[in-house]
């Protein structure tokens, strides 16, 4: 059932810092380190931004390029596809190489990877299919930008456009995968009965946060006080929570406030958190195409309900300003990526949010910038 009421603009919790999650294994990071073309993305220290916001430090994690693609999605798709293929062998726990799996599964008559996407996830899945010599069939909402469609097609994938909202496109992709015995659905959202592959995708994102730990340590900082993450179905911020609320974090480790940011017209997490249960919302149009999602992943929901300190919804204008400001600061950030800065500004302008999260002039903030401007330009 879709809730068509006016969305709340924010949510805050005073219990989120006490929540704990299981540990994500180091093997995920080790896997990414083994891949050709791996290198950490930049963590920009922007003192001028910190000064304007009234905090001590602001770092921007610029996910403008991962393995040659213009967003963070490859770290999740690569691990999930690798685990899925290894799981179809007689020895799932073996340390298979890419070439070995490609020889076993690739080529004519092989598997087809299927997913729905607003752009970046679908291109990452299609790219993984090409690397493994598999086929890919990607479903997209017809209204997404032509550049996103062209990016998917450039990977050799079959593209199906659906004149519907993202959640309905997911249903089409699911039906297509179910109808083809050689197809595997590689979706970055979960529902009852479909959680293993989305879980692997979330685990893949853990590499981003391990990199942040190392990069902050190099800067002489033992961890952030605030982490701000754009949110679509909730998988990336689920990974953020899994990292910063991991049960093995030492007693002295910082437990940063976790802030989620969504478009005003697709604020399914804000509405769900305020309702105390998952709420499906009717989405509108937004330049933040990768966040135009009406339903929170069932895998993410229980973790987000327990761990999110604050969730905010932002306007198109607030997001556009953030894109321009980050560009002026030398950060390549598209509309989804810049949402983190826009959301932080909303929090800092709201005394209940700012004070409730304990943000002060001594706070260290990390903003997740999830895509480049080329992945999702303002004018599509």
Image: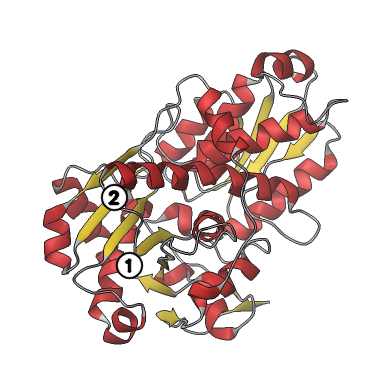
Element under disc 1: helix
As drawn, the label of residue 312 is none
Is residue 307 shown above or below 83? below
Q: Distance between the residues labelled 2 and 1?
A: 13 Å
Query: Looking at the image, is 209 positioned above or below residue 65?
Result: below
How is the rendered protein coloured?
Answer: secondary structure
- Mark 2 and mark 1 lie on one chain; the one further toward the N terminus is 2
Q: Can residue 255 be seen in this view?
A: yes
Left or right: 43 in relation to 132: left
Q: Where does the image place residue 291, in percent across and percent down from the top left?
A: 47, 58
Q: Where is residue 61 in the image (x, y as percent from the top left)?
A: 33, 47
Please state if 264 lies on the left or on the right of 316 as rendered. Answer: right
* Any part of residue 159 in sight: no
Quarter-of-image position of residue 299: bottom right
Mark whose residue sits in front, 2 or 1: 2
**Residue drawn at (21%, 48%) of the image:** 45
Mark 1 highlights which residue?
Answer: 343
Residue 375 in the figure: left or right of residue 301 = left
User: Which residue is at 56% across, 57% downward?
Assistant: 242
Residue 60 image label? 2
């Amino acid at each position: 059932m879709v809730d068509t009421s006016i969305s709340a603009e924010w949510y805050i919790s005073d219990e989120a810092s006490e929540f704990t999650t299981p540990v994500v294994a180091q093997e995920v990071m080790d896997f990414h380190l083994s891949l050709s073309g791996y290198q950490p993305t930049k963590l920009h220290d922007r003192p001028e931004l910190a000064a304007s916001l009234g905090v001590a430090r602001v770092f921007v994690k610029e996910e403008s390029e991962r393995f040659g693609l213009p967003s963070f999605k490859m770290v999740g798709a690569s691990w999930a596809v690798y685990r899925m293929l290894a799981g179809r062998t007689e020895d799932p726990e073996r340390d298979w190489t890419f070439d070995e799996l490609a020889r076993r599964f690739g080529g004519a008559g092989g598997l087809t990877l299927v997913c729905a996407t607003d752009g970046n996830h679908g291109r990452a899945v299609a790219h993984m299919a090409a690397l493994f010599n598999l086929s890919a069939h990607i479903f997209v909402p017809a209204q997404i930008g032509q550049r996103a469609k062209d990016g998917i097609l450039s990977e050799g994938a079959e593209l199906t456009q659906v004149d519907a909202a993202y959640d309905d496109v997911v249903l089409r992709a699911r039906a297509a995968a179910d109808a083809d015995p050689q197809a595997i659905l590689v979706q970055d959202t979960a529902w009852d009965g479909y959680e293993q592959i989305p879980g692997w995708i979330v685990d893949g994102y853990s590499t981003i946060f391990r990199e942040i730990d190392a990069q902050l340590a190099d800067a002489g900082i033992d961890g952030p006080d605030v982490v701000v993450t754009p949110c679509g179905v909730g998988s990336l911020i689920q990974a953020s929570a899994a990292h910063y609320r991991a049960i093995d974090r030492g007693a002295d480790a910082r437990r940063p406030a976790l802030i989620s940011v969504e478009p005003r017209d697709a604020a399914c997490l804000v509405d769900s958190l305020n309702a105390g249960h998952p709420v499906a919302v009717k989405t509108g149009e937004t330049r933040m195409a990768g966040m135009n999602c009406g339903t929170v992943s069932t895998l993410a929901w229980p973790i987000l309900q327990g761990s999110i300190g604050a969730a905010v919804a932002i306007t198109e204008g607030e997001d556009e300003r953030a894109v321009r400001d980050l560009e002026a600061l030398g950060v390549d950030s598209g509309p989804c990526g810049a949402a983190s800065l826009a959301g932080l500004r909303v929090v800092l302008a709201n005394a209940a949010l700012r004070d409730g999260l304990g943000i002060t002039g001594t706070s260290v903030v990390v903003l997740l910038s999830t895509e480049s401007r080329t992945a999702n330009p303002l004018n599509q």
